[in-house]
Amino acid sequence: MTVLNLAQALNQALDTALDRDKRVLVIGEDVGRTGGVFRVTDGLRARHDGERVVDTPVAESGIVGTAFGMAVGGLRPVVEIQFMGFSYPAFDQVISHVARIRNRSQHRFTAPMVIRIPYGGGIGAAEHHSESAEAIYAHTPGLKVVVPSGPYDAKGLLLAAIEDPDPVVFLEPIRLYRAVKEEVPEGFYTVPLGEARVIRPGADVTLVTYGAMTKEARQAAEILARDQIEVEVIDLRSLVPLDIDTVVGSVERTGRAVVVHEAPRTAGFGAELVAQIQERCLFSLEAPIRRVTGWDTVFPLKRTEHHYLPGADRIVAAVRATRED
Amino acid sequence: MTVLNLAQALNQALDTALDRDKRVLVIGEDVGRTGGVFRVTDGLRARHDGERVVDTPVAESGIVGTAFGMAVGGLRPVVEIQFMGFSYPAFDQVISHVARIRNRSQHRFTAPMVIRIPYGGGIGAAEHHSESAEAIYAHTPGLKVVVPSGPYDAKGLLLAAIEDPDPVVFLEPIRLYRAVKEEVPEGFYTVPLGEARVIRPGADVTLVTYGAMTKEARQAAEILARDQIEVEVIDLRSLVPLDIDTVVGSVERTGRAVVVHEAPRTAGFGAELVAQIQERCLFSLEAPIRRVTGWDTVFPLKRTEHHYLPGADRIVAAVRATRED
Amino acid sequence: MLQILDPSGELVADPPFDHTLGRRLYRAMVVARIYDRKCTSLQKQGRLATYAPFEGQEAAQVGSAAALLPEDWVVATYRDAAAMWMQGYPWELLILGRTGDERGGSPPDHVPVLPPSVTVGAHMLHAVGLAWAARANGEPRVAMTYFGDGATSEGDFHEAMNLAAVYRTGTVFLCQNNQYAISLSREEQTRSETIAQKADAYGMPGVQVDGNDLMAVYAASTEAVNRARTGDGPTLIEAVTYRLGPHTTSDDPDRYRDEAETAHWRLRDPIERMRRYLERVDEWDAGWQQQLEEEGTQEIERAVELAESLPPRPAAYLFDTMFEQPTPQLLAQRQELLEAAQP
Amino acid sequence: MLQILDPSGELVADPPFDHTLGRRLYRAMVVARIYDRKCTSLQKQGRLATYAPFEGQEAAQVGSAAALLPEDWVVATYRDAAAMWMQGYPWELLILGRTGDERGGSPPDHVPVLPPSVTVGAHMLHAVGLAWAARANGEPRVAMTYFGDGATSEGDFHEAMNLAAVYRTGTVFLCQNNQYAISLSREEQTRSETIAQKADAYGMPGVQVDGNDLMAVYAASTEAVNRARTGDGPTLIEAVTYRLGPHTTSDDPDRYRDEAETAHWRLRDPIERMRRYLERVDEWDAGWQQQLEEEGTQEIERAVELAESLPPRPAAYLFDTMFEQPTPQLLAQRQELLEAAQP
Ligand SMILES: Cc1ncc(C[n+]2csc(CCOP(=O)(O)OP(=O)(O)O)c2C)c(N)n1
Ligand SMILES: Cc1ncc(C[n+]2csc(CCOP(=O)(O)OP(=O)(O)O)c2C)c(N)n1
Ligand SMILES: [Mg+2]
Ligand SMILES: [Mg+2]
């Protein structure tokens, strides 16, 4: 057990996967010599050579399309897209081929691959570097969508994603790469995809979130606890498959729910959560489910991103409001 | 006034726009000599020449990216993407540039352009030819998303979209191109973007839908009427801007709502409708809002698409069920 | 432009194969055309969904696929049934796919052919990854990808060509330049004189061959396949041919090309060219032709029967082919569908 | 590779401009470098967001932009501040953008320069459409687009080049081959010998010039701009240069290139080369140099002040810049934000 941050935990997961499975390879822009923009692949090329940790030209569609062929051909590629804003040129490959080959060939061919994408804002980055497009991937049949929020989960979920027989879009909250440290076991272990985690129990209001927003949710819960408002915070960990039972179970007890994400609100994943919660337990609801989300705007640049990002303050306000509804 | 089907009405709209505004041009694959796969642009090249009705190579990103430059440069391009499944290669251009230039340049540059996309299934088409990705575009800040369901609206909405100072994704229900006929005025008129239409009043249950599904919704309403169940059917006509007031007003009266679309359910636009309805009038709800949608699967091929497409039968069942909840 | 057999069936260079193979490939072209025409008529009868005929492109497909070993990958399009069949994809599955049944996308385990790509351009990259995987697995397999002139306008063509060259993957890019992307002529698609010359942009060898010359296509493909197999990297082959039929059964070519042009290419029919040659060397006679056509017709009729005799599947299959194990959401939706099914 | 001024500042061909313009462009390069270094130091002080320095590429940017008329479009990247400024984009707005303020993306109405593109590749297509629009509007404007060696690996480069050639738009493709796409060297990006040769694939003229030779860049650009303006279509110019600094202020070049290489290119500094020439023809002396540096420093300092003195905007602006008129949803969200703002 060593204490690692999220980036280090992911690095260890990739190193472990490369060690234990000859079929695994890491491929992306600058993942080799520089170890990636966020150093998540740091040192891997030196330890596993350039044939298995591959620096590529700037061609996202090409990278994903090639990795798709590799996966169909029996390898287990782990693609890194430099920032979520640069996953869009590869969108056609993902939605039209990666997500479909199993269905198209009725299980004859499959694409077991992982597409790692740093996502979200909070570091004052340039345009296109703070995107949260998880809803788009979650809306695409045939993809699994995983979002870790801490080092332990990150490593276990990434190893599970690499072992998964189907394609996984693995979203890494940029803001948390170095913000959270945790004890992480050496070697191989997995955290199953599709199991939410209650990161804080509470009886009054259910707070449902994932990825970067778990930090703000925790903070909000602590602030509210001072006023004896006990918030149950749920980290979904994966959007597809979705562990809705854990969410519904909680809301049935609390009668109140707030969903939180950084992505724009309209048709964001929060809407799906609201829809499923009210389908399953409308009559337990004592108040409308509120959404604390990014706005329906372009993610702003450094000087104003704080106006966009849902912070503990907005979450606290929403929780208080839902108790007054 | 002549009776036209939806494709003819769109053709007339384009012809009218090309006549009255020199800045307008139509560009896309096979839109010229063949008049497009669905003949929506039939005859336009002959009437307005190849400089304004432009056949392009097979390069969706190139078409949209070039049209974007045209729009910034003062033209009013109307792009045709052959099928929604082929809009994905252009996705980066749409989300990263078309939708953003106004914000990026703080109104200094704008991209007034229309991207016409035939969408939806029901004609037993090949893979990728039956997509419904409206939620993806509706989730993208900076785009308007319009979906006509009849000839009169189609012409008026398309002319409004072409006049609009901002980019509009204009989704055309393939199945309705020739299925509905209506009296359509000659010449120029517009139907404002962002106004839903109650296509059938009713006091018992609110049915919210758009595009191809309006036909099934109407049918369902007629079937239910035989049992004295009066369904209010709302055709949104545009998803962005969204006329939620009309929807909420109706649900406040009926207390029950069913949302219907053809796209996959998870993170589909129906989820957004459910979320906003319960935010606005949870306490008027006498039953959970139900979603009748496509499944979270790839759109199936000809022999089994009937298993996928929400039909009047599924809508009827959902309406009955919501009255028993 | 590489040519071995001129349109009249005269040799203008040494033949790349002996009469045995020549007759086998001639037979393949004849059967392929029977399949192609059968599909068009089935479509007219409403027994198939939209169909994209390849009449006129038989030599380009048969000649190239003939250069492959059984374990080599083929990644092709909606118009490449002949090439896919050459590599082991059963006619009945090709037909089944065209009836609008996903089961047509699932070839037997030993057949290294992906289901036909319907999107234009994207699939070329898959052949780059497949060849890469073969090398990584130490398998001497190459990947041949088929695409049209129109596909070369897509960004994915560029990325596939560049990545294949950069990583020297054993990929063969077989472009059937049939002169049209639906209604857009080759000249309107790009200003490069040939498609073959586009290979220079990637430091890749490119060759233009007479795509209606079975021998030329076979010779160029064999050379490219050997280069790929021996680790010397990818090749672009432009097979100059012509789509004699419509783009698909719902296309009307009169809107964008005239009779005369089609007639001109009719005279360059790849099957007739090879027939003349075989006749000239006494390897063809009317009797054999009749036999081929009878065998071919039987073979295709049998395939049609097989495809059409397959019972439809219960709706539940939809949910069972998305992942190895359906997610809880899919299971719930399957349940919902089954309940909706019962009145 | 076209060269007019060799690294020692000797003419090897006729100069494309007189001393007046030569001095003006030399001055521009000096000021641009002052701006570039200032930005790096501001970033280190936390006053700018990540910054992408262009030191070493001044001749490529200044020499090409100098070939434009005031109404010509410039569509460039995050590393092209010098070119954008040459075409009228104010330093203070370039700096403002780098502080992370959208207002930096809004040049004055008479400045035909798009805000810098952060995505690699996509923007080249915008220059195709802009040139097309100019022609359609009967304006004699051309569009010059700037991009790097790395951008040529993107599919959009291919589509932009092809469409520009097919429609003969007045677009000039100015590639600054600075030898790296972040950590990937030019040789690892593509196996074509030059980037210029990629133009052949589109039937487009392509020329490789010494990008650190102000005169060569100016000469090639002038020819390309004239071709574009007279309706003879697009040109690809590969300006061979070198990024002397890191990819951005958060990059560590030691991970992928060695000192010696950088040192080698230092000796080819484009500004020093032009200085030697001017000195040789008695158009340069230390006094003038000092004057330039003082003026330049003042100019940049003033720009920094202007940029930093701009007061932040109320959050509401977020909702007011998405559409000409905010949608009801945006108005509601703006309301929500304002209410959240008040405790
Ligand atoms: C990405 C994409 N865009 C558009 C289409 C529609 N489409 C189908 S075939 C075709 C033309 C392709 O031409 P070519 O590559 O020459 O192949 P051919 O049909 O001539 O065999 C087009 C535009 C598609 N299938 N995929
Ligand atoms: C579509 C896209 N992919 C990846 C990136 C990340 N990125 C920023 S700059 C860069 C390298 C570009 O190299 P080049 O085109 O040579 O320009 P240079 O930075 O050398 O000026 C990359 C990969 C991006 N901005 N956009
Ligand atoms: Mg073709
Ligand atoms: Mg570079």
Image: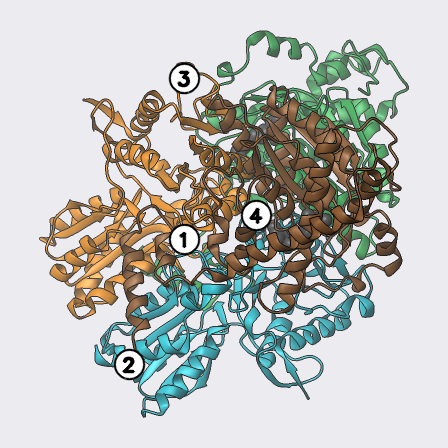
Chain colours: A cyan, B orange, C green, D brown
Task: Bin the neighbour count of mark 4 within 10 Å (Cα to Cα): few under 14, some 14-19, many 20 and up.
Answer: many
Q: CA distance from mark 3 to mark 4?
A: 36 Å
B24 sits left or right of C163 in the view = left
Contact check, label 1 and label 3, Cβ < 8 Å: no
Res. B296 image quadrant: bottom left
The answer for which chain carries disc 3 is B
Respond whether the residues carrying marks 1 and 4 are from the same subunit: no
Q: CA distance from mark 1 to mark 4?
A: 20 Å
Q: Identify the amino acid type marked 1.
A: Pro
Could you tell me the amino acid type at mark 2?
A: Arg
Please name the residue that numbered disc 1 is placed on.
Answer: B141
In what quadrant of the picture does the N terminus of chain A appear? Answer: bottom right
Examine the rendered structure and indicate whether residue B171 appears above or below residue B28: below
**Assess mark 1: CB under 8 A from ligand 2?**
no
Q: Amino acid at mark 4?
A: Pro
Q: Pointer 4: what residue? A: D116
Answer above or below: position of C92 versus A307.
above
| Other residues around mark 2 within 10 Å, as few (<14) / some (14–19) / many (≥20) | some
Residue for badge 2: A320
Spot occupied by residue D58 in the image (x, y as percentages of width and height): 72, 45
Q: Which of disc 3 and disc 1 is earlier in sequence?
A: 3
Q: Which residue is mark 3?
A: B48
Respond whether the residues carrying marks 2 and 4 are from the same subunit: no
Percent of width and height locating residue B80: 44, 33
